[in-house]
Image: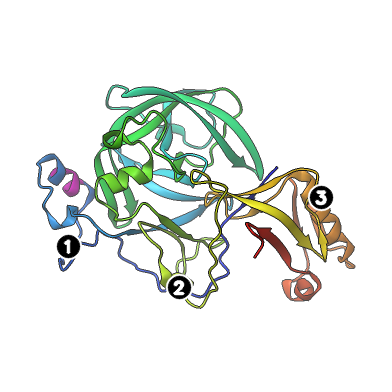
Amino acid sequence: MIACLGFGASVASAQFIDAVRYRPVDVQEPELTIQEKFDLVEEGHFDHPNLQAGQYADIRMAVLKDFNHVIDFKFGHKIDKFRLIPDTALNEVAVQTHKCKGCTGPAGDKMYQPTNAPHRNATQTLDYFYLLHMFEVELKGAHYKERACIVHDPSPAVCLMNFHLFGISSVDSFFYANGDGYLGLGIGDGEGSMGDDDKLSFMAQLKKHNLIEKNVFSVYTQMNNSTDNPSQIRFGGINENLFEGADLKYIDTKGPGSWKLPLSEIVFGGDNILDPSYTSEALINPAFPFIAAPIGEFNAFKRQLKSIDSDDSLVCNNLDWCYFEAKCDDIRDKIPNLQFKLGSGD
């Protein structure tokens, strides 16, 4: 059994770095446009300050349709932005191609149209959320090399010329992506990688091109689109300013290649609602800004909520979603804490 934990925002108000750019030491240069950076790379000016290695890059994340965080990308010469969902279930960038069989979703005419021949055919498996339900789908396609930029208006943060991405050409079951594709943050080199010079995972590519110092990232999220204190991700480090005053705890995952945590208890109203008959795990995934649980645990949680709802203000629908129609101030003190026992349980 797997529960999914989104990244909560119960931390102190943050100091947000407004300008997203490379961070060369002791160099102050105006930020270049996407086309200007592409031109520098194509002309071989890798020593230009705007292309030198940085320690990290901060990228704002929007919340799309209240269900997913997204990061904007541009590929090749296409003007449109691709809204990619950051997801730890993959470790590569995966986008729907314009000929994808079985793909559905809002991508429409923004589906990726390769400008180069396929680099290598591949198949990948993705567990993804749609309308609060988890689906598993097999993705078939090929790897392509493109020039790409992570976009942060009004200027880009990260640009690469020979960027590897996975173009989805067909799927074996229901597949509906709220965004235009997925930005893989999973651990590993990527499916089909061939040594240190040919790593396909997104994070490995950033490090290979010296755009970040460390192969790590950190996430700070809000449940809505806030302009004063937005969700953001830092590639290459941890933005400690965002968590000032918070009691941060580090928990070992199930293994060196996993984003899953051991889960032994879910306590609500004094009762452990986690089914003890099977081993449980929690999946950490920034794509999904909510806490999701299997239907059995959700129903136990729902029964507990109904038992304390004396005013019948709790409304649940057939999408396994519940909400209170009462004012928050009227019910806040009535609802007990929801507690998770993760890792060693400390």
- Cα distance in 3D space between marks 1 and 3: 55 Å
Q: Main secondary structure of the magenta part?
A: helix
Q: What is the three-letter code of the residue carrying label 1?
A: Pro
Image quadrant for the N terminus?
top right
Q: What is the three-letter code of the residue carrying label 3?
A: Asn
Please tell me which of labels 3 and 2 falls first in the chain.
Answer: 2
Front residue (pair 111, 193): 193
- Give the quarter of the image for residue 155: bottom left
Circle 1: element type: loop
Q: Is residue 36 magenta?
A: yes
Numbered tag placed on residue 14 in the rendering = 2
Q: Which residue is disc 1 drawn over?
A: 30
Q: Read off the magenta span.
A: 35-39
Residue at screen point 86% across, 60% down = 306
Q: Which residue is disc 3 drawn over?
A: 299
Instruction: Answer left or right for 170 relative to 318.
Output: left
Q: Which of the two discs, 2 and 1, sits closer to the camera?
A: 2
Residue at screen point 31% across, 33% down = 195
